[in-house]
Image (cartoon, coloured by chain):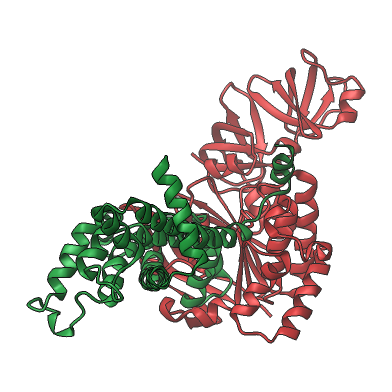
Chain colours: A green, B red
């Protein structure tokens, strides 16, 4: 309990003093996780929508691969992205290994299957005839997709929350492709692991509280956004008030 | 102004089974067609194919004589509107739901607003405009669904059992409004229904489907009184289906000797083994002392009287089982009671014969 208390106090002082080292790590964490989530949404939402709505040969295989990807261990992703980006690897000449860009790539690989799979599920949960109804209203293919995405927005926001949760919490891939280099690729998760290995449990605990706070704040914003769009039926509202 | 529709050689198969096989169907401009048939008859599939929402395996659709390419059908699809059994409203306000089709078409906002407000008023749902669509009752939701279709000013309206889930008064009111709007606008309409009582009210023509094929088409009265098959007869509410042997008798009415030895006269000129179809509402039940009817006068005993909506289903044993319909006033007079002896009479024209 002493370590927890010390960690809390330490976190308080680090934040109050706006410790430059910590602020740098927080900013990089925010940047890398935000970009990785954005890339995974950019890939996962259209791909999930396509998989939910289109029939094509091999669709089940692709869906199986996406579902497998949803449980992909971060260290495996880190290893494969490292192989690709190492100087001797196929993409080595890009010089991305041990850079924030490499971390974004690795984390996007982790989050994209989550966003794809959950988007697909959200679209598939819409009433089966809604697609036909929207087409019958004269929608072009683009208008159809956009309308269905809006209808599935609760599920899609859940997909984005899951994707963000996947990247902000992982440490294996980030340290393998980023290398935890001070002022360059050190993020909250890798810094926490490093402080634990050094025996600085109070600092590690402080970083973990900051990480938790960051994760909570961003997820809370997304959750508020998600729940604001939810239409609660009148009867249910009354029931909630009674409860 | 409506569009004329012609369908040729339509075939649709699913799971290795042919579910639609329509060789020819012609729907004139401004005509209202009803599609009837039991579950799995292919009515909804035919409607979706005609509405360009499902591409047939083979066959062609022509709108106003022009062959439709299903892959370039958006401009045609934007001249149609479809109302389904479930309202399938989007998760937004009533106003936005009614406006969505117009927005797809890129109609300017002032026109959208004017047209949406007009149709909300026609369907008496203006007060719901800002309400979330998902909080409406079934009847209100279906009104929104109709407004969403009519606001598009379609040239063809397709309705797939739009009122099947509604209570009787709401259904009656919406049917009346639909009838009025269809007559006012002069658009072509095709509707699917399970309820044959809607046919004479709404439809100019009816196509009856069975096993994916059109087994009969024509005026609603023809389908209801002279169905082409025994299955169709049962579907359109003919409860008296009596097997027998018909004998042509010169130019006079056909004599039908029914199983059980009773002989009746029929209006259809068919000989040989037949099934005599007699609608229950054609049978008049009288006391045994009533004046003699010229023909088809069967003496029998009432077995059961079963309430059926506002009427009563009277089952009579005349040596063969007959079902008639009686009003409440007849029951109140006390002449209809189980066990009582009665006369069942009906004109020969009411008896339609289907070759067995």
Residue B279 image offset from top left, x and y in percent: 69, 39
Asked if residue B84 can be seen in this view, the reply is yes
Which residue is found at the position 48% from the left and 70% from the top? A18
Outermost residue toward the top in this view: B339
| Along the viewing direction, whichever of A156 and B196 lies nearer the viewer | A156
Outermost residue toward the left in this view: A88
Residue B294 placement, left or right of B229: right
Which residue is found at the position 56% from the left and 45% from the top? B232
Which residue is found at the position 45% from the left and 46% from the top? A5
Residue B290 image offset from top left, x and y in percent: 87, 25
Q: How many marks?
A: 0
Which residue is found at the position 75% from the left and 55% from the top? B140
Residue B107 image offset from top left, x and y in percent: 66, 85
Residue B313 sits in which quadrant? top right
Residue B4 placement, left or right of A45: right
Asked if residue B79 is positioned above or below residue B272 in the image, the reply reads below
Residue A20 image offset from top left, x and y in percent: 42, 73
Asked if residue A158 can be seen in this view, the reply is no
Q: Which quadrant: the N terminus of chain B? A: bottom right
Residue B298 placement, left or right of A72: right
Asked if residue A130 is positioned above or below residue B104 in the image, the reply reads above
| Along the viewing direction, whichever of B148 and A64 lies nearer the viewer | A64
Outermost residue toward the right in this view: B333
Residue B255 placement, left or right of B180: left
Residue B236 sits in which quadrant? top right
């Amino acid at each position: 309990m002493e370590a927890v208390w010390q960690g809390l106090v330490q976190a308080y002082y680090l934040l109050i003093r706006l410790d430059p080292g910590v602020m740098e790590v927080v900013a990089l964490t925010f940047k890398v996780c935000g970009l990785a989530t954005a890339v995974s949404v950019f890939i996962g939402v259209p791909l999930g929508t396509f998989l939910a709505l289109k029939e094509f040969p091999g669709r089940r295989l692709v869906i199986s691969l996406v579902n497998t990807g949803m449980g992909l261990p971060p260290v495996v992703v880190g290893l494969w992205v490292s192989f690709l980006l190492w100087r001797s690897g196929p993409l080595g000449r890009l010089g991305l290994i041990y850079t924030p860009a490499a971390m974004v790539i690795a984390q996007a690989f982790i989050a994209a299957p989550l966003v794809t799979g959950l988007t697909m599920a959200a679209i598939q949960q819409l009433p089966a005839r809604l697609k036909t109804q929207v087409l019958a209203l004269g929608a072009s293919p683009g208008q159809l997709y956009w309308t269905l995405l809006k209808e599935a927005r609760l599920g899609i926001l859940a997909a984005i929350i899951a994707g963000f949760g996947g990247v902000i919490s992982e440490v294996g891939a980030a340290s393998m492709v980023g290398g935890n280099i001070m002022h360059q690729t050190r993020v909250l998760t890798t810094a926490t692991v490093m402080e634990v290995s050094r025996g600085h449990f109070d600092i590690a605990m402080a970083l973990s509280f900051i990480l938790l706070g960051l994760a909570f704040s961003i997820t809370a914003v997304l959750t508020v956004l998600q729940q604001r769009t939810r239409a609660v039926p009148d009867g249910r509202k009354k029931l909630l008030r009674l409860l | 102004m409506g569009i004329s529709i012609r369908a040729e050689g339509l075939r649709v198969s699913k799971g290795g089974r042919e579910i639609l096989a329509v060789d020819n169907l012609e729907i004139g401009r401004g005509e209202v067609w009803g599609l009837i048939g039991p579950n799995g008859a292919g009515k909804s599939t035919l409607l979706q194919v005609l509405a360009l929402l499902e591409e047939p395996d083979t066959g062609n659709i022509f709108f106003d004589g022009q062959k439709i390419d299903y892959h370039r059908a958006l401009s045609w699809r934007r001249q149609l509107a479809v109302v389904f059994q479930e309202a399938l409203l989007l998760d937004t306000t009533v106003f936005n739901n009614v406006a969505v089709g117009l927005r797809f078409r890129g109609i300017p906002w002032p026109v959208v607003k004017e047209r949406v407000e007009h149709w909300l008023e026609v369907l008496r749902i203006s007060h719901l405009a800002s309400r979330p669509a998902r909080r409406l009752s079934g009847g209100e939701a279906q009104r929104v669904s109709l407004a969403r279709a009519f606001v598009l000013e379609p040239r063809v309206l397709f309705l797939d059992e739009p009122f099947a889930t509604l209570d009787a008064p709401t259904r009656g009111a919406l049917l009346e409004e639909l009838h009025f709007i269809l007559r006012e606008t002069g658009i072509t309409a095709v509707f699917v229904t399970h309820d044959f009582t809607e046919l004479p009210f709404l439809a100019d023509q009816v196509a009856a489907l069975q096993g994916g094929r059109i087994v009969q088409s024509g005026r609603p009265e023809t389908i209801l009184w002279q169905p082409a098959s025994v299955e169709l007869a049962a579907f359109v509410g003919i409860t008296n289906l009596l097997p027998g042997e018909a004998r042509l008798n010169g130019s006079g009415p056909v004599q039908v000797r029914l199983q059980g030895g009773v002989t009746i006269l029929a209006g259809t000129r068919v000989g040989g083994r037949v099934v005599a179809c007699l609608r229950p509402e054609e049978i008049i039940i009288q006391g045994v002392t009533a004046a003699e009817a010229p023909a088809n006068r069967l003496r029998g005993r009432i077995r059961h009287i079963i309430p059926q909506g506002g009427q009563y289903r009277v089952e009579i044993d005349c040596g063969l089982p007959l079902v008639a319909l009686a009003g409440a006033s007849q029951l109140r007079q006390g002449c209809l009671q189980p066990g009582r002896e009665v006369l069942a009479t009906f004109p020969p024209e009411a008896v339609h014969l289907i070759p067995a």
